[in-house]
Image: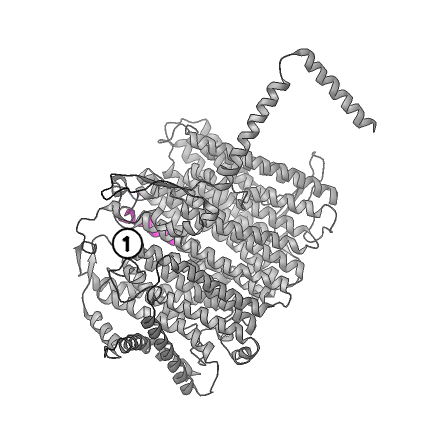
Amino acid sequence: MLLQLLLHLLIVLLFPPLLLGVITRTKALFAGRKGPPLLQPYYDLHRLWQKGFVISRTTTWVFRAGPIVGLIVPLLAALLIPFGAIPAPFSFNGDLILFVYLFALARFFTASSALDTGSSFEGMGAAREVTFACLVEPTLLFALIVLVRLSGGFSLNDLLGKHLVTSWQSAGASLLLLVIALFVVLLVENCRIPFDDPNTHLELTMIHEVMVLDHSGPAFAMILYGASLKLLVLGALLVRLILPWDSGNPGVDAVVFMAGMLFIAVAIGVVESVMARLQMVRIPQLLIGTTMISIFALVLVLR
Amino acid sequence: MIFFLSGIVIIALSGLPGLFMSSRDDRGQAFAEILALLGTITTFIGLLLCTTNAGETVLRAGWNIPGGELLIRIDAISLIFLLPFLLVFAMSVIFGKDYWPQTQHPENSRKLRLFHGLIAAAIALVLTAQNGILFLLSWEIMALASYFLITTEDDLEATRRAGFIYLVATHTGTLALFALFALLDLSCGSFSLPAAGTLPAGAVTTAIFLLALFGFGLKAGIMPLHIWLPGAHAAAPSHISALLSGIMIKTGIYGLVRITSLFATIPLWWGWVLIVLGVITGIFGVAYALAQHDLKRLLAYHSVENIGIIALGLGLALLGRSAGLPELAMLGLAGALLHVVNHALFKSLLFLSAGAVIHATGTREIDQMGGLIRSQPWTAALFLGGAVAICGLPPFNGFISEWFIYQGSFRALIDQRLSLSLAILVAPVLALIGGLALACFVKVFGIVFLGAPRTPAAANGHDATRLMRAAMLILLAACLSIGLLPWLFAPMLKDAALAWAPISGGEAISASMTSLIWIGILGTALILFSGLLSWWLHRRSCLADAQQPTWGCGYLWPTARMQYTASSFADALVKLFRFGLWSSEHGGRTIGLFPPRTDFSSHTPDSVLDRLLLPLFRVLAIAATWLRTWLQNGVTSLYLLYVVLTLIALLIISGR
């Protein structure tokens, strides 16, 4: 029990930036380059942490609240979600709602902090972020609803618990649809191609990167770290769906989980390498399509 | 009971002495405010006595009006509505002292305070009356007092128009209520309301439900009956809007809750009707809000949205009762009732802070503001708290009530009957409403308070006075306390839910206690860690060079007017909802390689009122005028013919 808690916390605190490194390396390999070292995100965080700030004169305390909430929220959410077979430290009936709404809280403050700069560019990013979130949130909820129906429980530990092995046999089609829908949610929420491009800073088609344009130094480090945590937390949902087995040994479970996460990072890298970014007007259509997929998944388990 | 009643009387009469005092100094105002607060405290003491002594909760007295006795009872349901009402009324009085002082508004301030007291007393009676006639009496006083409050500034054309629409709407609703209570009298033989769960199903049951839905729905603002709401809330002074939006429209919800509690059995379709109405009201309420750029109209549409959320909870509760799922009924009703309380708190907070903004800038147009956080740091922080709360985000109170409704919908999901599991669609709808509300409040907070000031008026505002701040701060503290200590409020909800439906199943609320404690702990942790981190970040960043401009991507001379506006922020979402909104846009075309100066404006009128009802009524008015000139033509002999015809018709009818 204590060992599981320790492993959970270690994964939360140390593992996330590695995922970013793996994505970057995968993309580099696809492009025929050598790419930066796998640990580059850690070096970046360290470097940013020691830098000073440059703060626009238009901004106020709201500007600084964005990165703070953007870091605290994924940290708290990480305590609610099981990492593979390692159960979540905090678990209670209805924690899935808190899980979803915590991310909404982070979005509120990130978007407000973007508007605080008074730049029309960042206003654009904030507007897009909140617009697309409206279309993603129902999808995530539909996915969780399917899991509630299959498991009969109301906490994330139950939802992603032992029932999954049998559920794959009884409702495999619907779980497969969920995996697809959740992968799209993962890509959108973590600002990945084809929805958003985390690498370009000057394109009019960006969403998240444009919102954090004016942040610098430790605040920007918090944003980077928070983003990688978000990738871990949302990816954990997906990993558990794909690898529903328990080994009984916490160490093995942790390794299996991390291997699953790395696989997802590679998958994201592959998607980013082989796809172009979508036209802005196509994004809502694709998101509504994904919602439909999750509705199909629900219909399949309700019939 | 004597405390409760005398408190109501003091509140009702609080504005009266001021009428006989000078309209140039503020003695009358001080008198009215002290009386109103005194009355509020007395009423509150009365409520406290009720909770400890069961004998205090009922007042019976004979009266000369036929149809039962004078009966006032304070039960758990009334209590849930009365407590936020007292708080919001007191805060609205305190806020009004500096917001609408006698010396600045000598022409209408005395009238305002008279009706402010009257409406409060009437609301308290509406929430406790157990006799149909007493209910209708206080309902009508409430409706008329609110009409005079809405038309406080009756020198403005828009205000008179909004007031007139309200008057028509509220009386249409009252008409339905007259029929409703007549039918109730018919089926239980007295104007006194029967005990909960005792009214047997009969021929008139359906009629009673539909009349209640129409009459009370019109007051609550369920779409498409919301027509009066945006205009009226925008026209009234802000501290009055807080009371109207926070409390008065909830009397409609109270009516629905009370009437549905009377029946012994409930058909399945009642719950579905409320759920479907709730979905429409919630989604379109917030979509209309997104399209607005008048601050108070926007907040008014959010009231419509929140009424939709409450209707969703109530619908789930009705489903639970008719399907024999007590857990669903309890959780749904607990969510609906707690959302009534929560919306009263955060919406009045938002209206009060909007009032402070309008007081400082002199406009309601969001696009004329910007950067107000510098001149109004307190108002900005308080508005931010209200905005986070209304989006249903943790650690505030809105999250708790929505959490109850979600929990209820999960109970429906795991039921094996497909007709019930479909009620789970409430959950994604709530998520969509939450997402849209978030977009809308990021828009309002960002455009009004953040960025650079768009006009000189926005740059040179002043913050709310100390008294106004205190009123808002108390409301915010109430929001936060429900968000962080939700388990303290669960027993009250359980009592109310059990008073609504005398069935077992209260355990569902008790069982959620553990979860509520966890939510409270995590919310506290969230605030604590954010506080620590911001303290640290502030210390590290205070050495930073803060004189840099925002990076304009290479463009060196950005102006404040180039910032994103309310319309541009909401554009993508408004376009997604164009099938229901039908926004109209004018101008904005650019022609040629070197386009000349051009204008652009967008406007979203209310589809039901401006596109359906008003044209329809205009045609009706023309037809009626034509009919009148034809019938009433001034020829006396024809008038005599009418009399004869009427007599013959009456003879035929009575002779049958």
Which residue is disc 1 drawn over? A116
Please state the horizontal and vertical placement of residue B166, each as a whole percent of the image: 52, 36
Residue B309 showing in the rendered view: yes
Q: Main secondary structure of the magenta part?
A: helix
Please state the horizontal and vertical placement of residue B279, each as a whole percent of the image: 53, 53
| Residue drawn at x 41%, y 34% as measured from the top left | B29
Quadrant housing the C terminus of chain B: top right
Magenta stretch contains residue B376: yes
Q: Is residue B442 above or below residue A268?
A: above
Horizontal relation, residue B51 to residue B381: left or right? right
Please state the horizontal and vertical placement of residue B351, each as a whole percent of the image: 41, 45
| Residue drawn at x 76%, y 20% as measured from the top left | B647
Count of numbered tags: 1
| Residue drawn at x 70%, y 54% as measured from the top left | B264
Residue range highlighted in magenta: B369-387
In the depicted view, which residue is nearer to us: A5 or B315? B315
Q: Is residue B344 above or below residue B417?
A: above
Magenta stretch contains residue B350: no
Horizontal relation, residue B366 to residue B322: left or right? left
Horizontal relation, residue B90 to residue B628: left or right? left
Quadrant housing the N terminus of chain B: top right
User: Dot 1 surroundings within 10 Å: few (below 14), some, or many (20 or more)?
Assistant: many
| Residue at the limit of the structure toward the front, as seen here | B592
